[in-house]
Amino acid sequence: MFEFSINNSAPKSELYRELVRSADALTKGEPDGIANMANIAALLWEYLPDVNWTGFYRVIDGELVLGPFQGKAACIRIALGDGVCGAAAASGQTQLVEDVHAFPGHIACDANSLSELVVPVTRAGQVVAVIDLDSPILARFDADDVSGIEALAGLLADRI
């Protein structure tokens, strides 16, 4: 059993350092990418305040396919370029969206989501997955969240 004492009221930079350390402990030496994504989705869900969805979409045969997550049931397949997740996967660039209703082509899997952060996970220059975080609060995510989740994506690149 893993027990972590991450202080989610700490400054975000400290919170994300602890999350990445915990993610490293959870995934180190585990070859099953699905198991690793499942544990990381749960870790993010437990320790990030004000989120209503945390999880992964995997790039499979040229589209995004739902991976392990925490939250309401979600869209199963997303075309590359569609919605926030598809934009991140197609461009290889992090998508920080303060108001999802202002994002052209946003795909609403949960009507309560108001802001979103999607970070590509790349291996050997190719996007293999995206980490998707949703919040019911407008502008919930900021540069500290981007840096923290990008660090997590870097750690996971060879573990998922």
Image (cartoon, rainbow, N blue to C red):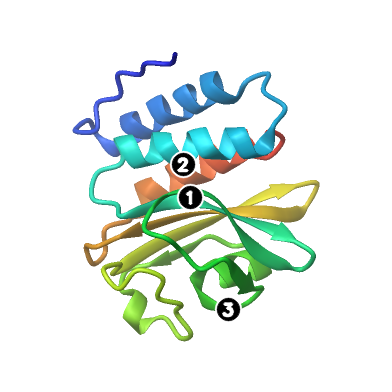
Q: Residue 83: x and y, percent?
A: 51, 76
* SS of the residue under disc 2: helix
Q: Residue furthest bottom?
A: 104
Mark 3: give few (<14), some (14-19) or many (20+) Cα within 10 Å.
some
Determine which of the numbered discs, if any, sits on residue 55 in the image: 1
Q: Residue 92: x and y, percent?
A: 65, 62
Residue matched to label 2: 41
Q: Residue 54: x and y, percent?
A: 41, 50
Identify the residue at horizontal 65%, vertical 75% (top origin): 79
Identify the residue at horizontal 50%, vertical 71% (top origin): 84
Look at the image and tell me in which quarter the N terminus lies.
Answer: top left
- First in sequence: mark 2 vs mark 1: 2
Q: Which is closer to the viewer, label 3 or label 1?
A: 1
Q: Residue 11: x and y, percent?
A: 24, 34
User: Residue 134 lies in what quarter of the image?
Assistant: bottom left
30 or 24: nearer the viewer: 30
Mark 1: give few (<14), some (14-19) or many (20+) Cα within 10 Å.
many
146 shown above or below 63: above
